[in-house]
Image: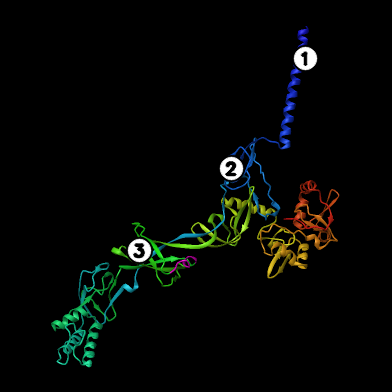
Amino acid sequence: MKKYSLIPLVLFLLALSFLGGYWVNHKSAEKTGGSGDRKILYYIDPMHPAYKSDKPGIAPDCGMKLEPVYEDGSAGNTGEADVSSMPPGTVSISPQKQQLIGVRVAIVEKASQSHTLRTVGRIAPDEKRVYRLVAGIDGWIRETYNNDTGTLVKKDERLASFYSPQFRAAQLAYLAILGSGEDRFHAGGRQALAPSQQASVSLQTYIDALESLGMSEQQMKELASTRQITDKVFIMAPATGFIIARNVSPGQRFDKGTEWYRIADLSRVWVLADLFRNEAEYVKPGMKVKVTIPQTRKTLHAVVSTVLPQFDPNSRTLKVRLELENPGYTLRPDMFVDVEFPVILPAALTVPADAVLDSGIRKTVFIDRGNGYFEPCKVETGWRFGNRIEITKGLMPGERIVVSGTFLIDSESRMKAAAAGIYGESSKDPVCGMYVDEGKAKASGKTGSYSKKIYYFCSDDCKQKFDKNPGLYLKKTGGSKGSRDTTGMKNTRALNTATMVHNDPICNMDVDEKSARAGGRISEYQGKTYYFCADSCKQQFDKEPERYIDKKVEGGGNKAHPATSAPTHD
């Protein structure tokens, strides 16, 4: 009986031991989770999470502090960022999310750039090497020879023959002056040997008449040598080249001024390259250019002509002329070639093209402020070649900017700015340092001008203070609109030591009690009065007062104090 009576006691002791162990483990887990004393597995590089270390320290690539990764898989920042000094639209992205969306950063550097400007060129004959054979008299074509369009002909080669009645009289007059006993001439008939100047002039007149009618110098020499009248006058090639136009056929009648042939010497050709206006300014006369034939990949070298580029109204581009030797007549008119201009630019700040977000009226880059914070920054750009863009204003050498994943960061940044009441361009209030939507400030009349510059304010109180003594605030903010100054105003309350100043629970800005009451920017909550610098801060407080009350209690509460020091809003 005693044996069976002990069984309940044993079971009771086992249950008590189990419950005691469970309670101890539960309290230990609560202590670990509640105190934040979590177990650290390893440390990672915040910009490159693939890098791991078992000890805290500095990342070898970017110089940032390594972040811990805890046993529960979460990560935490080891450093703190002054978010209040950052403009609206600044976003915080964890290292894991950065890796997921492919965020990459690069350092802005100032250096000279070498680029290759590529475009397409069209082959054209050199106008100084194009010859037009035109009829100087009415007549008929007697014969044509083997010289179709595109045929290569040699200098002084016979192309065709023609007949004209006017040639007979001109030849008779020429032979008569040659046969007179008054003069002696060379067989060529070009120079007179007689001392009579009048006879020489007469002979030259008949020579010019034959030339104007279309007889070549070679045929005139034959006429002077044989002294026989001919009814067949030959059309001769004036130079070696290709026939690019042919307008004759046997038996054809032609009028004076008709073009018989057009011959182009293609031993040297032009390349007409299309460039935009911003590109053409980097192309100088005498520059050596690389020309490539696409089909054969054969490379030639051309020189930029001294002739200024001509504007093409159809393509809205500038035609740059290049002069190019054409060995073996490889290039023919109207062929297309690839042209590469070597462009060397002076030292300038440049960034990858993907780093700049261009909305048409605003160009933005994101600056890496460390600890996962990315700040939007408005920039102005200059030239663009290939994948690089010149930054003329907005960045400084050494700053780290986002060069990949910018679109996803921009979308989150826009939502952050909209949540802060910024929908357009923003400027910093020179009095309190708060960022203000320019459109809203302009619509409510909270703007002021000084030294031909416009300044925007968050409230009428800031505007009135600025209007009384603008030099005081501009001296401390640098006086430039949109500057990324984070020093803040340190002596604002010194302007009026007699008034009571309260702390805005939203933005932590010091607010003059009288001005806040006059503008209706006060709220009552749990028996206390809170003062605000702007209507937007009051609206945020009224929506969720507990959120901001808890924050102010931790920092010492919303207390009224004499105006003895400056606010530190930023």
Q: CA distance from mark 2 to mark 3?
A: 54 Å
Sequence-wise first label, 2 or 3: 2
Q: Nearer the viewer, residue 192 or 522?
A: 192
Q: Is residue 164 above or below residue 393?
A: below
Q: Is residue 436 left or right of residue 368?
A: right
Sequence-wise first label, 1 or 3: 1
Q: Is residue 380 above or below residue 100?
A: below
Callout 2: 10 Å neighbours few (<14), some, many (20+)? some
Sequence-wise first label, 2 or 1: 1
Q: Nearer the viewer, residue 492 or 63?
A: 63
SS of the residue under disc 1: helix
Q: Nearer the viewer, residue 238 or 116?
A: 116
Q: Is residue 322 left or right of residue 349?
A: left
Q: Which residue is mark 3?
A: 335
Kind of residue at badge 2 = Pro
Kind of residue at badge 1 = Leu
Q: Is residue 197 left or right of residue 298?
A: left
Q: Which percent across, then down, holds residue 232?
A: 18, 79
Q: Which percent across, then down, holds residue 369?
A: 64, 51
Asked if marks 2 and 1 touch (Cβ < 8 Å), the reply is no
Kind of residue at badge 3 = Met
- Residue that appears at 69% across and 53% down: 419
Asked if marks 2 and 3 touch (Cβ < 8 Å), the reply is no
| Residue closest to the far top | 1
Q: Which residue is mark 2?
A: 49
Q: Which percent across, then down, holds residue 375?
A: 64, 54
320 inside magenta stretch: no
| Residues shaded magenta | 278-284
Q: CA distance from mark 1 to mark 3?
A: 107 Å
